[in-house]
Amino acid sequence: MKVDHVVYFTQKTPLEVVWEQRQLGWHAVMGGSHEQWGTYNALMYVHNAYIEWLALEHEKIANASDNPLIQLYMYDRADVEGWGTICFSVEQIEAVHNRLKKQGYPTSGILHAERKTTSGAIRRWKMLFIDQKPSDALPYPFFIEWEIEEKERLEILRTEGTILQENEQLEVTSCLFNVRDVEQTTEEWQVILGLESTKDTENTMIKLPNCTLKFTEKIKEVKERLIDVSIVYRE
């Protein structure tokens, strides 16, 4: 299990996001449309994960969607721009589903999803969510299994120009979450992810193969959310 991508909720169009990011020197690209959800996105890949800017394309469809990610977006939509949640990639999503059920977590069941790219290509994957009504509480992470293996998927992205060499010089090193109870949240995420935690002078952490999750309770007056993603140049 590792971080697949982090989701940023935006009221801008993907085209606006791409333009802004390129002005900052980042190679972001148009992603495509989630036609069954009423959303579309922009993407920026780095060496070990990617950033997704999720935006509203068709409000009526999005309002009717039962996809937990879209429901969370619609709940947070009135707020300023900000990070929404985090996704982990797994090789056997059925096994994760069975483990979570045994641990007592109700789930969405395994969902089949797809996105039409701007070139008309279809990207497909499976998703899994823990049942949770959108609120100010920290959203549980969700899980993804891609239709094709990672090596093949990345080669396609390189060939089409979505990933440039400059993208692969960057990596996500940590994700910081603002929570009201660090100990309780960390313990629950350990169970969900099947991992142990450690602690430094400031934050409690869960280390994954490609990223470190950090939890802090410094900002208590706002929603519990992902609040910072550290992206650095690879050494």
Image (spheres, grey):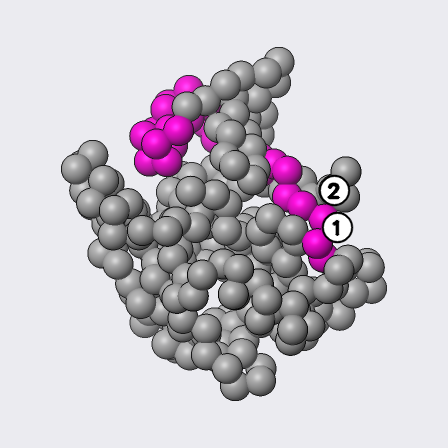
Question: Is residue 173 shown left or right of residue 187?
Answer: right
Residue 201 figure quarter: top right
Question: Is residue 39 shown left or right of residue 172?
Answer: left
Which amino acid is tagged 1? Gln
Q: Please report whichever mark, 1 or 2, sits nearer to the chain's N-terminal start.
A: 1
Residue 231 inside the magenta-drawn segment = no
Decide which of 203, 94 is in the foreground and name it. Answer: 94
Disc 1 to disc 2, C-alpha distance: 6 Å
Q: Which residue is mark 2?
A: 234
x and y, in percent, of residue 101 in the image: 18, 42
x and y, in percent, of residue 53 in the image: 58, 61
Mark 1–mark 2 CB contact (< 8 Å): yes
Decide which of 79, 211 is in the foreground and name it. Answer: 211
User: What residue appears at the point 70 percent right and 54 percent down from the top-left corner?
Assistant: 168
Residue 169 inside the magenta-drawn segment = yes
Residue 157 figure quarter: bottom right
Q: Which range is magenta? A: 167-195
Question: Is residue 24 shown left or right of residue 185?
Answer: right
x and y, in percent, of residue 181 in the image: 43, 23
The numbered dot on residue 169 is 1
Q: Residue 186, relative to residue 93: is it above or below?
A: above
For the residue labelled by badge 1, is the local secondary structure a helix, a strand or a loop?
A: helix
